[in-house]
Image (tube, rainbow, N blue to C red):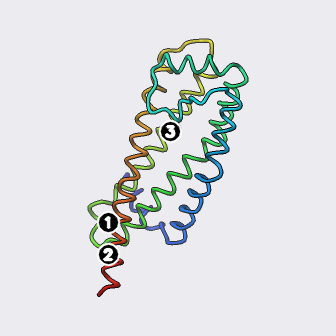
Amino acid sequence: MPKRISQWLLSVSSTWLMVASLLVMLLFMVFVLPAQSKEAYRQTGSDRSPDTSFYYSPQELYQMAADYGEEGRQAYITARWTFDLVFPLVYTSFLTIGISWFITRLPGWSENWSLANLLPILGGIFDLLENTAATLVMSAFPSNYGVILTAASLFTPIKWILVSAGFVPYFVYGATWGIQQIRKRKE
């Protein structure tokens, strides 16, 4: 099944999709993320968020929920199921399409390295798992469900590791493709 998904991604990752996903990612990073960050601070009164932390303990997450207050928790939940549903789709598409596009243009790489285009999808899945667990914590507060607190605190670093790891093949393949293009022009 993973190989079929990877092959499908390789077959649909056209140049226009690659450029479109790059533009959407850049627009998100320049306009949406800074605005969302300011709004989150305004609504929660805190610059600390489970989504932007690499790791937090279950107790720290519970304390964040307490510090946010009722309105802050509701704002956090709303943001997770609006903005933070879209952003994982944006970065997952950007990385998956980009990796697939580069692989199809690197002779011999599609057979050996094609599954690298699935790595960003795993990051996106763990982002959604983190959002779900953190939402449950915020909505259940002041109840303290240790399993959910622990799950959220585990999903977050896994998400960050997978998302960060998804950038590695993007830039390695991109640099390799760029070097090949320079060599071709010199010949």
Distance between mark 2 and mark 1 Cα atoms = 16 Å
Q: Which mark lies nearer to you, 1 or 3?
A: 3
- Taking depth in this image into account, of 7 and 148 the one nearest to the observer is 148
Q: Is residue 76 above or below residue 185?
A: above
Whole-percent x and y of residue 55?
44, 29
* x 40%, y 36%: residue: 158
| Residue at numbered disc 1 | 110
* Residue under label 3: 127
Q: Earlier in the sequence, mark 1 or mark 3?
A: 1
Helix, strand, or loop for circle 1? Answer: helix
Amino acid type at circle 1 is: Ser
Q: Residue furthest top?
A: 143
Categorize mark 3 by other alpha carbons within 10 Å: few (<14), some (14-19), many (20+). many
Choose the circle earlier in sequence order: 3 or 2. Answer: 3
Crowding at dot 1, Cα within 10 Å, few <14 / some 14-19 / many 20+, comes out as some
Tag on residue 35?
A: none
Quadrant of the rendered structure where residue 111 is?
bottom left
Q: Quadrant of the C terminus?
A: bottom left
Depth-wise, is mark 3 or mark 2 nearer the camera? 2
Marks 1 and 3, how far apart in space?
27 Å
* Type of amino acid at the residue the image marks with label 3: Asp
Mark 2 residue crowding within 10 angstroms, few (<14) / some (14–19) / many (20+): some
Query: Are the residues flagged by discs 1 and 3 in contact, CB closer than 8 Å?
Result: no
Question: In the depicted view, which residue is nearer to us: 93 or 46?
Answer: 46
Circle 3/circle 2 CB separation < 8 Å: no
Q: Secondary structure at mark 2?
A: helix
Instruction: Give how far across and how far down residue 164 sits, in percent.
Output: 41, 46
Task: Give the CA separation, mark 3 to mark 2.
Answer: 34 Å
Read off the residue under disc 2. Answer: 180
